[in-house]
Amino acid sequence: MLKGIDPLITPELLKLLMEMGHDEAVLLADANFTALSLGAGKPVIRLPGAGMAQVVKAINALLPLAADVAHPVAFMQVSSTEPPYLSALQREVLDLLKDSLLPHQQAEPVERYAFYERVQKACAIVVTGELQPFGNFILRKGVIGETLRP
């Protein structure tokens, strides 16, 4: 245990978040997500006792979101719905992330099968204990650094 780090952040997850580079993505998946087949060859970290909102809150405290893209957060759109529909879970998670988004940014709803294609580009999958369907989010990492010196 370390001061200031949520106990949900396991040593394996902390290492993964630290090793991710700028613009790499991590998938935060619900308990029903097909992580082994869609994430073949990628690290899969399991947090079976934790809901999505808890995990997002803990990770968001450590992971800077990409500032150079319009959509640093993507989420799986609920099937048979059209944007701007959001499930209660999606509203809760996006509310947790809103202060991390810049004024020109927003979260992007992505159709289920297109979302699966994006998973192929993620560097890892964190499977939570979230039981709400369509509770899947992709976060793109930004940078922490000094202002560019001319």
Image: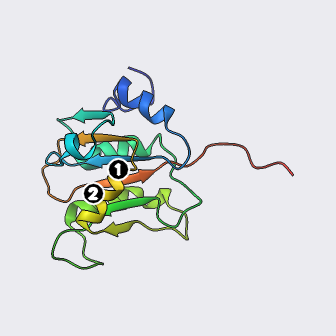
Count of number-bearing discs: 2
The three-letter code of the residue at mark 2 reads Tyr
The three-letter code of the residue at mark 1 reads Gln
Indicate which disc residue 120 carries.
1
Q: Are marks 2 and 1 in contact (CB under 8 Å)?
A: yes
Q: Residue at x 32, y 55 (%)?
A: 137
Say few, some or many: other residues with alpha carbon within 10 Å of mark 2 (under 14 / 14 to 19 / 20 or more): some
Indicate which disc residue 133 carries.
none
Estimate the spatial distance between the alpha carbons at disc 2 and disc 1, rounded to whole Å. Answer: 7 Å
Q: Position of residue 86 (x, y in %)?
A: 25, 70
Q: Position of residue 135 (x, y in %)?
A: 22, 56
Q: Secondary structure at mark 1?
A: loop
The image quadrant of residue 67 is: bottom right
Q: Nearer the viewer, residue 24 or 72?
A: 24
Q: Which residue is mark 2?
A: 116
Q: Is residue 36 above or below residue 81?
A: above
Instruction: Pick out the residue farthest to the top.
Output: 1
In this picture, residue 26 sits left or right of residue 101: left
Q: Is residue 11 above or below residue 46?
A: above
Q: Is residue 36 above or below residue 113?
A: above
Q: Quadrant of the N terminus?
A: top left
Say few, some or many: other residues with alpha carbon within 10 Å of mark 1 (under 14 / 14 to 19 / 20 or more): some
Q: Secondary structure at mark 2?
A: helix
**Is residue 91 something one can see in this rendering?**
no
Instruction: Pick out the residue farthest to the right.
Output: 150
In this picture, residue 64 sits left or right of residue 49: right
